[in-house]
Amino acid sequence: MIEFKLPSLGADMDEGTLLEWRVKPGDAVKKGQVIAVVDTAKAAVDIECWQDGTISELLAEVGQKMPVGTVMATLSATGEKAGATSEKTAAAKVGAGGTALAGAPPAVPAAPPQTALPAAPAAPALRRMISPAARKHAAEKGVDIDSLTGSGPHGAVILADVETAAAQGAAATPRPPVAGTAELPSAEKGAARIAAMRQAIATAMARSKREIPHYYVAEDIPLARALAWLQTANSQRAMAERLLPAVLLLKAVAVTLRSYPELNGWCHDGAFVTAERSNLGVAISLRQGGLIAPALLDAGTKPLTQLMQELTDLVQRARAGSLRSSELTDGTITVTNLGDQGTQTVFGVIYPPQVALVGFGRILERPWAEDGGLKVLPVVTASLAADHRVSDGHRGALFLRELAELLQHPEELNKEAS
């Protein structure tokens, strides 16, 4: 029997609220399949299954707020016969008040087990919740999702609401709010959302600075050759297919990491685990405020065109609140790029349990000594924040020098996809 637990979707997540189940008992599921939607302080997230199997029981109820690690469901492994419900599973189906959930065997008179799930709170909704599937389906069907009042927990709009609205001709009449919920003005909902997100970020960053001995190094990198190559490459592309400088920087980081595995991975309980792939967490500012860093998976093996497409898609989905759990859990290093509106240099805070963060400031025209003369060239400052328990400043400096050298040969980045 496999226990499916609520995963931690980052150092800034302690709990989540189940918005929707995508499966039912008896369904066969594959690794990577989305089986639930959970709302966190930052977004509603599609939760993926990590193993193949068959759903045995759904232990968590829609609307239930759960701490990370709570058993949400049980699965039978492939080839395993579904047996009698274990005592542990039976106990997990008993609510905090001692009342057995529908279909659960009578509870054994004993002390409440640690796996017991708390009862769903009746707190009023502080912000509008929309499942990623509902948002995507509404866009496809042309349904104005803002006109819908959802039937999910605390008024959450779920997939079924969009399908009903589409069947009725898109502009569905809003249903009355779910009993026990209080509708707040949009401005207040937004403020509550931002406040919760800022608190989550502050908690994670305080933990990072408290537990991780940071060191910082920086390097100025001339980008004249990279930008000239980019301009030539883009002149041969349609407008929608053009590459941004950010994609060159991301690819260069992913490729350089191959020589510095001590910067690519996670530190758990003081032990470092090297990642097999370079999954770049991309820091994305959200329109309503706050920050999120979903990952571009296996960035070092993808050609620039594919990486650009995936970056565009990731930014759009992050801002629409439509991310997958693997994009929030599998990042091996974070890259923050301040872009055209940023400052010259950024020194970031490592996102635990990762051990490094690469920052890029704004590309500026600056005086540069080259070939015995002085020129004015576009220059970007790259910085590295790294964990002194795993690496040191010497290795960090070598990483930035190799990164700088790689960006002098952008054509090699375009070829590199192995």
Image: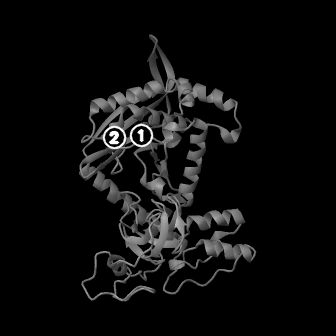
* Numbered tag placed on residue 359 in the rendering: 1
Q: Is the image coloured rainbow, by chain, by secondary structure, or in one colour?
A: one colour
Position of residue 165 measured from the top left corner of the image (x, y, whole percent)? 69, 75
- Looking at the rendered structure, the kind of residue marked 1 is Gly
Three-letter amino acid code at the position of disc 2 = Ala
Q: Which residue is painted at 56% across and 45% down in the image?
A: 311
Task: Indicate the secondary structure of the residue bearing disc 2.
Answer: strand
Residue found at the far top of this picture: 372
Relative height, residue 229 to residue 67 (above, below): above
Given residues 192 and 151, the one toward you in this image is 151
User: Which residue is pictured at 46% across the width and 11% down the height?
Assistant: 371
- Check disc 2 and report the residue beneath it: 385
- In the image as oriented, which residue stretches furthest toward the right? 169
Percent of width and height locating residue 130: 56, 69
Q: Few, some or many C-alpha atoms within 10 Å of disc 2 (few <14, some 14-19, many ≥20)?
A: many
Q: Is residue 291 something one can see in this rendering?
A: no
Give the quadrant of the N terminus. Answer: bottom left
Towards the viewer: 191 or 248: 248
Say if mark 1 contacts mark 2, CB within 8 Å.
Answer: yes
Residue 15 spot, x, y in % from top left: 38, 68
Q: Could you tell me which secondary element the residue under label 1 belongs to?
A: strand
